Image (cartoon, rainbow, N blue to C red):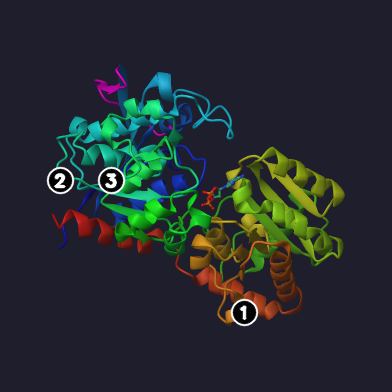
Amino acid sequence: MPKALRILHVASEMVPLVKTGGLADVAGALPLALKRQGHDARVVIPAYRRAIAEADKRGISWGPVPMTIEVGGIDHQVGVGTVDIDGLTVHLIACNELFDREGIYGPSPSNDYDDNARRFAVFCKAALALPGYLRWMPHVIHAHDWQAGLIPALLQRGYNQVLPATRTVFSIHNVAYQGTFWHFDMKLTGLDWGLFNPMHVEHYGKLNLLKAGIVFADRVVAVSRRYAEEIQMPEFAYGLDAVIKGHSYKLSGITNGIDAGVWNPATDTHLPAKFDKKKLAGKKVCKDKLRQECGLVRDNDACLVAVVSRLVEQKGIDLLIEAVGPYILSGRMQLVVLGSGDLAIEARLSQLQARHPGWVYVWYGYNDPLAHRVIAGADAFAMPSRYEPCGLTQMYSMRYGTLPIVRYTGGLADTVVDVASGHGNGFTFGPIDLGHFSSVLDRALGLYQHFPEDWKKAQLRGMTADFSWDHVADEYIALYESISFAE
Ligand code: ADP
């Protein structure tokens, strides 16, 4: 019987406490899957105001004494909250002057807080002090993204003498977000100034916390197999390609799973009608109700294409806006978009909606129940992403019999197989330009209109695929075992 591992996940967000992107889904689901396999996994996140409000509802308890965490000559009193989420122990690092704010990374999605280097240095140091505080020594600390990038560096440089045998895994969820700060913030890290060089934590004159994680971790994981390849290339790596290539000996790609309990059309309480692959009738009801809810014209056979996404350049929404006009005007396609982000993209979407009343509907903001209804009610789901580390929504869509139309990149390439192969579950295209995107739309709308039997076969293939975390957790366990048993 293999030994049960103790694994501490250090992440900046996790569902259901706080979420701005896919990282939160992973930090919520992977530890639970590890627990189901008999391992002792826990999570630690910052106690943002929003996270405390959610944790309060679930009965958070606070440790009797705070920890004192020194960063850049200032002592911070840090409380440790603990809450049980579906059997998973989650710790929250509370420090009111740093985390009790309305925003997560900044006052608005496009603005960062000025003291983020300090906020996440305190978080990382507190996370490293946690095992001693709890008398619970992890075999592995799994740090996620730049906010936890200092963890591998501090541990490797002997910041915490209590954890000499603990190994680190560092996950890159999106290499575009690197946590770069001016060089004076080096004094906040607790690392020796001697490490401020291009081989370690400096990148073009700045402190780079993602790089710190990559350089010092025992293993580095990218959130899909293809993304692990792509981030070694200049066009995807936002300047870190050489660094990542240089550490590729310890890099692997593990494609994320999805929470198959939350995203299950047969049990989804957000839907007006449930369905599964044997009884697809409920999906038709979902489409009808969605069109009604969105004020879309209902008496036609148009293919309902959906987007649920952050509205940022990465997601290629600009290309979608440019491409869809002729398809909508010819009555072949309707569009529902749920998302928020870049104001310029939002303005263009509003223009599109104004130009095509009853055929385009856009809802700005974050709305989880609506995301479920949109994904269930749509026929197809568009993700023309410039890059996509893993992407979750294409997998949710497939489970709901909604065919993804995606760019062949990152996790989209790992999970979507083009129908042209004869055993596909969606549509893929390569170069990110209007011609290629229009031609994939043509193919998708053509199959929908003229070959409903083939469309249904593709739907069923998607609905049958196993994207569950249990399967993915096995790959992580093998990785953890390979480092924690070797030494
Ligand atoms: P990313 O992490 O780049 O934002 P992913 O596809 O990996 O993209 O994850 C996005 C997650 O956020 C999914 O769970 C998706 O359903 C959710 N999401 C994105 N935008 C919205 C929104 N406006 N309302 C509800 N959920 C959203």
In the rendered image, which residue does mark 3 sit on?
216
Closer to the camera, 268 or 297?
A: 297
**CB-based contact (under 8 Å), mark 2 and mark 1:** no
Give the camera-side residue of 60 and 446.
Answer: 446
40 magenta-colored: no
Residue 95 - label: none
Q: Mark 2 — residue? A: 165
> Within 8 Å of ligand 1, the CB of disc 1?
no
Q: Are marks 3 and 1 in contact (CB under 8 Å)?
A: no
Q: Is residue 162 above or below residue 403?
A: above
SS of the residue at dot 3?
Answer: helix
Instruction: Give the residue displayed 39% in from the left and 59% down from the top.
Output: 469
Is residue 373 in view from this perspective?
no
Q: Position of residue 486 (x, y in %)?
A: 15, 58
Disc 1 designates what residue?
A: 420
Can the viewer see residue 123? Answer: yes
Q: Secondary structure at mark 1?
A: helix
Amino acid beneath label 1? Ala
Q: Earlier in the sequence, mark 3 or mark 2?
A: 2
- Residue located farthest toward the bottom when viewing the structure as drawn: 422
Left or right of residue 5: residue 55 = right
Whether label 2 lies within 8 Å of ligand 1 gets the answer: no
Q: Residue 428 appears at what percent x and percent y?
A: 61, 69
Q: CA distance from mark 3 to mark 1?
A: 43 Å
**Callout 2 environment at 10 Å: few (<14), some (14 to 19), or many (20+)?**
some
Name the residue: 34% across, 26% down.
Answer: 188
Q: Residue at x 76, y 74 (%)?
A: 449
Image: magenta residue range: 56-73
Callout 3 amino acid: Phe
Q: Is residue 371 left or right of residue 82?
A: right
Q: Nearer the viewer, mark 3 or mark 1?
A: 3
* 296 relative to 8, above or below: below
